[in-house]
Amino acid sequence: MSKQPNIIAIDGPAASGKSTLGERLAKHFGYLYFDTGVMYRAVTWAVLHSSCDVRDEIAVTKIAENTQIEVLPPSAACRKYDVLIDGRDITDEIRSPEVEAMVSVVSAYPGVRRAMSLQQRRIGLRGNVVMVGRDIGTVVLPEAPLKVYLEASVEVRAKRRLLEVKQRDPQMSYEEVLQALMRRDEIDSTRSVAPLRPADDAHIIHTDNLTIEEVVRKVIDLSRGV
Ligand code: DC
């Protein structure tokens, strides 16, 4: 790679460390950090707060097409961004167990994915962006000059996610987090449209035995063609 990549795509399963890596890289390069999972979570929140059944694909798709999701710079130091739906701040609510349990179902619907991918692609093509998700390198921005796919065992991911979740819900057990991750892995990787998988030209990094600093360093080296 001769010059600094202007689009960095990061994909991988839930709790593989994508968002921490994405944020650090965005800071390093002075790029926009865009976490696409937030959009699927926002649609799921909107569905759960409507009278529509999550299993009703047509109604859920209509909600995805007609809801205005905004991801804005954070209004508080403890946040990475503010997420608004039709003007209402739902930043904290999109991490609730209810949203967590249903987001894989909602994000498997092709019409929902079409609506979200179009918006994400438009933002990504402006460049100077680190975009994080499940299908960024394969579908949203296949032309990204640097693609990274993070892998980690489900046990290591469950341990990392538990530390995060415990701050909000001290009752949560390792076993519950592990089961929820396994369910999401299964749905995310077997759905018919844009299943979770590395792009053919993605750099695959196994993070079980790496610190976040080591992963960041590896990707910066990759960006320089080291
Ligand atoms: O990264 P996350 O855990 O916030 O993602 C939430 C869900 O959204 C996840 O179960 C899969 C889905 N997702 C997706 O299908 N495609 C993306 N680009 C990002 C997230």
Image (tube, helix red, strand yellow):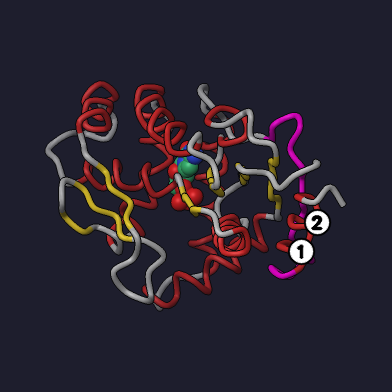
Q: Is residue 59 magenta?
A: no
* Contact? badges 1 and 2 (CB < 8 Å): yes
Specify the farthest residue to the left.
Answer: 51
Which of the two residues, 41 or 116, is positioned nearer the viewer here? 116
* Label 2 packing within 10 angstroms: few (<14), some (14-19), many (20+): few
Q: Which residues are magenta?
A: 198-213
The image shows residue 50 at horizontal and vertical percentages of 14, 41
Vertically, is 39 above or below 135?
below
Q: Label 1, on which residue?
A: 217
Residue 97 in view here:
no
| Spatial CA span between label 1 and label 2 | 6 Å
Q: How many marks?
A: 2
Residue 143, above or below 225: above
Element at label 1: helix
**Quadrant in the picture for residue 94:** bottom left
Residue 101 visible to the viewer:
yes
Q: Residue at x 80, y 51 (%)?
A: 224
Reply above or below: 62 against 16.
above
Per the image, the residue denoted by label 2 is 221
Instruction: Examine the structure image and report whether residue 199 is included in the region drawn in magenta.
Output: yes
Say which of 72 and 196 sits in front: 72
- Write the residue at 69% across / 41% down: 147
Query: Tag 2: residue type?
Result: Asp
